[in-house]
Amino acid sequence: MCKVGKGRTDFSKASRVRGGTRKMKIIAICGLPGSGKSTAIAAIKDLGIVVSMGDVVRNEAKKKKIDPTGKNLGKIAKDLRNKNGAGIIAQKCLSIIEKLEEQVIFVDGIRSFEEVNIFREYWKLPIIAIIVDEKKRLKWLVERARSDDPKNFKEIEERDRRERKFGLNNILKNADYKLLNDSTIGDLKQKTRELIMNLLEDY
């Protein structure tokens, strides 16, 4: 197993491919809510397929006919992990990936070392973290107003606390690559695409 450690990850041990039938290039992209992660992913959608860990949770809400508010989704994610282990959402993503024909896959929403190490049983999984100034992030998050987004700063704090409790801070700190979202949308997209192209070439 190729586990996350301090600094850049040694990918030499991650040589196996799930099922042993085909090689896939899988890259994780992470960031706190409102960091610009969705913008970064939008710049590379044509290069592969996106598997969203958040969508796994939203699908659980749909199955249970629960309103997909941020609070409800957070509770579902917590309950899934408490009942089935910290890596359960990553395991559900593996089941999705196994059925895909694409060779390039972007995993959106890694939140813990446990999830990372499940993927790294089979693939390199370089991790890209989107980093942004905290004041800008909070402003963008309020302006975005997605259905599952927090509606005020108190709710933002509650969501951030939940994400960090899952382990996201450690993932951001130990990411293999960090993209600073400190300029324009176009700049973030360009930086993301250039990095992804380089990673795919050397994968």
Image (cartoon, rainbow, N blue to C red):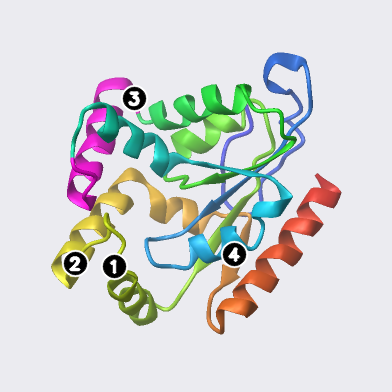
* Residue 187 relative to residue 144: left or right: right
Label number found at residue 85: 3
Instruction: Please report the residue visible at 64 percent of the width from the left and 53 percent of the height from the top.
Output: 45
* Residue 16 relative to residue 145: left or right: right
CB of mark 3 within 8 Å of CB of mark 1?
A: no
Query: Which residue position is annotated with label 2?
Result: 151
Instruction: Please report the residue visible at 19 percent of the width from the left and 39 percent of the height from the top.
Output: 75
CB of mark 1 within 8 Å of CB of mark 2?
A: yes
Answer with mark 3 or mark 1, whichever residue precedes in sequence.
Answer: 3
Q: Secondary structure at mark 2?
A: loop
Q: Is residue 180 above or below residue 24?
A: below
Answer with mark 1 or mark 2, whichever residue precedes in sequence.
Answer: 1
Q: Nearer the viewer, residue 184 or 136?
A: 184
Q: Amino acid at mark 2?
A: Lys
Q: Amino acid at mark 1?
A: Ala
Point out the image quarter for the C terminus. top right
* Residue 153 relative to residue 51: left or right: left
Query: Which residue position is annotated with label 4?
Result: 178
Instruction: Please report the residue visible at 31 percent of the width from the left and 61 percent of the height from the top.
Output: 146
Residue range in magenta is 67-85
Label number found at residue 129: none
CB of mark 3 within 8 Å of CB of mark 2?
A: no
